Amino acid sequence: MKPNISAFFPAYNEEKNIANTVHKAKAVLEQLAGDYEILVINDGSSDQTLAVARGLEAEFPKVKVINHEINRGYGGALKSGFYNARYEWVAFTDSDGQFDFSELSKLLEKSSDSDLVVGYRLKRVEGFIRKLNARLWGILIWLVFGLRVKDIDCAFKLIKRDVFDRIPKLESNGALISAELLIRCRKADLKIAQVGVHHYPRLEGNPTGANLNVIIKAFKELL
């Protein structure tokens, strides 16, 4: 029996990417899911992301837009997806096309005996500074919280919806959100599986994860 899946995509200034992301997700979910929904979380974009997303919502009944008038940050966008999802499994990845959503099948293969399945990038396609930041961040989280996973911030995860009823409400609005989620799941003795996924270059738009303000905010949340 195919699982019912809520898939969501946080989007900040992704006008050139969001349509392709939604179309790909729709095709994948029609193959892998029983019933499904696709949520686009527009996080205060200043470009035409909202307009494009509204067009997709009007075209496809299973697409729903959640709009943040003001940017809430990556964690804020993820929380909107987590807490508005309706189906038994919640899948998410970013809207920039750096992951192949068809690899959701690999995560589903691990879902039968797991509460959440987290991806890890088999080979990161980012520059040296981003890789270094990620490495140092992972070490810091391990030292402070004792959490050690292969790729703590990989933006491709599959989570049982009831996980969010079994852990305290998530608080982070920034880049700490993935670490907070995994730390809370570990403390609740939930089962976490890890799956390697491929990572691709961003084709359009500009990344925000390596932005100095994002990094500083994450460290402030950690403290």
Image: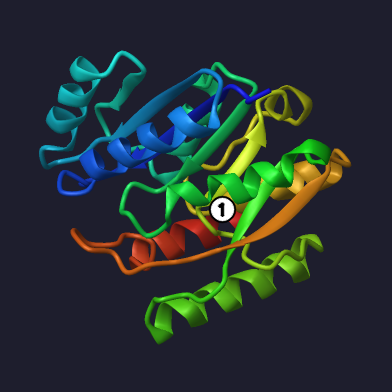
Q: Position of residue 108 (x, y in %)?
A: 65, 41
Judging depth in this view, the residue of 57 and 176 nearest the camera is 57
Q: Amino acid at mark 1?
A: Leu
Q: Position of residue 8 (x, y in %)?
A: 43, 33
Could you tell me which residue is drawn at 33 percent across and 41 percent down? 24
Could you tell me which residue is drawn at 77 percent across and 61 percent down? 147
Which corner quadrant of the image does residue 49 belong to? top left
Q: Position of residue 186 (x, y in %)?
A: 82, 47
Q: Secondary structure at mark 1?
A: loop
Judging depth in this view, the residue of 100 and 206 nearest the camera is 100
182 w.r.t. 218: above or below: above
Q: Residues within 10 Å of mark 1 (few under 14, many from 20)?
A: many
Is 98 positioned to the left or the right of 103 in the image? left
Q: Position of residue 130 (x, y in %)?
A: 43, 76
Of all residues, the one furthest to the bottom in this rendering is 128
Which corner quadrant of the image does residue 137 belong to? bottom right
158 w.r.t. 195: above or below: above
Q: Quadrant for the N terminus, please.
A: top right
Judging depth in this view, the residue of 17 and 142 nearest the camera is 17
200 w.r.t. 117: above or below: below
Could you tell me which residue is drawn at 15 percent across and 32 percent down? 52
Q: Quadrant for the C terminus, please.
A: bottom right
* Residue at which label 1 appears: 176
Is 160 positioned to the left or the right of 204 in the image? right
67 w.r.t. 211: above or below: above
Q: Is residue 177 visible in this depiction of the protein?
A: no
